[in-house]
Amino acid sequence: MKCVVSVLGKDRSGIVAAVATALAECGANIDDISQTILDSIFSMTMLTTLDLEKADFNDVQERLERVGEDLGVQIIIQREDVFQMMHKI
């Protein structure tokens, strides 16, 4: 399943590593990634592929929420088809 992961928050060391590690532990692959820092605001968007045999969408979402809480950033994961439909309107 293709998903879009968005991360937003105050810049700090280890954000990319923590998110990538959490995704890898869930068996997800990062297909594409874009990240930038505006002043001290960190923003990252990832296109990922989830391996549903290893972890379903809800499991990955809960894992990323915990990582976001630990880092003090907001992490949102959306199914790519839902993301595409939201931005079509």
Image (cartoon, rainbow, N blue to C red):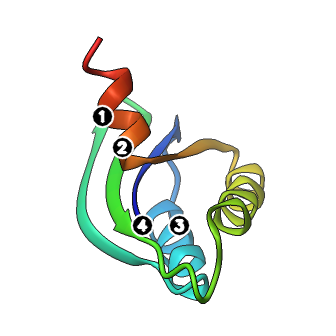
Quarter the N terminus occupies:
bottom left
Secondary element type, mark 3: helix
Q: CA distance from mark 4 to mark 3?
A: 18 Å
Left/right of residue 72 with respect to residue 84 in the rendered view: right
Residue position for label 4? 1
* Up-down relation of residue 15 to residue 36 (above or below): below
Question: Mark 1: which amino acid?
Answer: Gln
- 31 lies left or right of 4: left
Pointer 3 local density, CA inside 10 Å: few below 14, some 14–19, many at least 20: many
Quadrant of the image occupied by residue 71: bottom right
Q: From where the camera sits, is residue 86 visible?
A: yes
Q: Which mark is residue 84?
A: 1
The quarter of the rendered structure image containing the C terminus is top left
Residue density around tag 1, few if under 14, some if 14–19, many if 20 or more, within 10 Å: few
**Residue 25, above or below 56:** below
> Which of the two labelled residues, at mark 2 and mark 4, occupies the earlier sequence position?
4
Q: Residue at x 53, y 66 (%)?
A: 19
